[in-house]
Image (spheres, grey):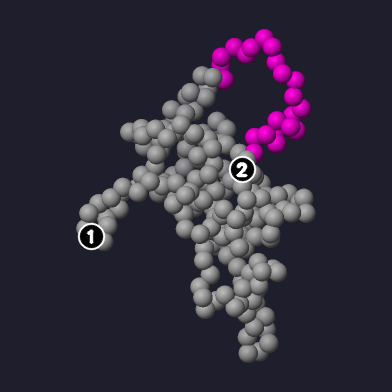
Amino acid sequence: MQNIEMNEEEYLKQHIAQAETKKNKPEPKVKLEVEATNVDSLKYFSFDVKEFPCSIFYPAGTTIQIRPAEVREIQAYSMVDDTNYYDIVEKMNEMLAACVRIKYADGRIGSYLELKDPDRFWTIFTIRELTFQQGSNLVSNVTCTCGQEVAIELKRQSFVKYEINEKLKKYFNPAINSFTFETVGDTIYHLSPPSIGLQKAFTEYIVKE
């Protein structure tokens, strides 16, 4: 990746301008005849769910298919209000809705709503890397425990994979990809991180009320 001295908003605008320039160039006289369905499939890159931070909470054999963002999606995302957390989440949801789909081992296709909410940022960073393959690095300046300020590059490889606490391992049920707890009243609860769909429903209810 190249290091470019500009913030994320400036970089998005530059990328949009370059993409628009390419779009306005005259098309070549010779065109290849390719089926639209094949072209659509080729846009997506498949990621084994094992790569995701919350991988243990998905059915075995699940793959997450992700494609680069297109100009119209980048334009919409660049309009985010950085001071409004709800707007930030909604803009991320719009990007995920356009660029992500889930394929299960039995062939079923699911939407981004079935992603675990903690995997949201990992997926957004993956879309960014696929879209801006020669792009600028995102860096966050943090203060070390030694008192010095250090720069940490923000990328999906920096995310920590979820590890089950030793005390909780005996409660994890791999058959249903969640924790199972039985109370003294014989009530059984199955718990796992919320999906983006569930989190979205809660957020919309909170905003409404």
**For the residue labelled by badge 1, is the local secondary structure a helix, a strand or a loop?**
loop
Q: Nearer the viewer, mark 1 or mark 2?
A: 1
Q: Residue furthest bottom?
A: 184
**Which residue is pictured at 51% across the width and 59% down the height?**
161
Q: Position of residue 74 (x, y in %)?
A: 52, 35
Say if the magenta span includes residue 168.
no
Residue on which disc 2 sits: 66
Depth check: 36 or 159 in front? 159
**Residue lying at the far left of the rendered structure:** 147
Q: Is residue 24 magenta?
A: yes
Q: Residue at x 33, y 33 (%)?
A: 5
Q: At label 2, which amino acid type do we have? A: Ile
Name the mark on residue 146: 1
Task: Decide if residue 189 is in sight here.
Answer: yes
Q: Residue at x 62, y 51 (%)?
A: 48
- Earlier in the chain: of badge 1 and badge 2, it is 2
Q: Residue at x 48, y 48 (%)?
A: 156
| Secondary structure of the residue carrying numbered label 2 | strand
Q: Position of residue 91 (x, y in %)?
A: 53, 45
- Which quadrant holds the C terminus? bottom right
**Mark 1, other Cα within 10 Å: few <14 / some 14–19 / many ≥20:** few
Question: Label 1 vs label 2: CA separation?
Answer: 39 Å
- Indicate the quadrant containing the N terminus: top left, top right, bottom left or bottom right: top left
Q: Please, what is the three-letter code of the amino acid marked with disc 1?
A: Cys
Eyeballing the image, is 99 above or below 111? Answer: above
Q: Position of residue 46 (x, y in %)?
A: 64, 44
Mark 1 near mark 2, Cβ–Cβ under 8 Å?
A: no
Residue 205 circle label? none
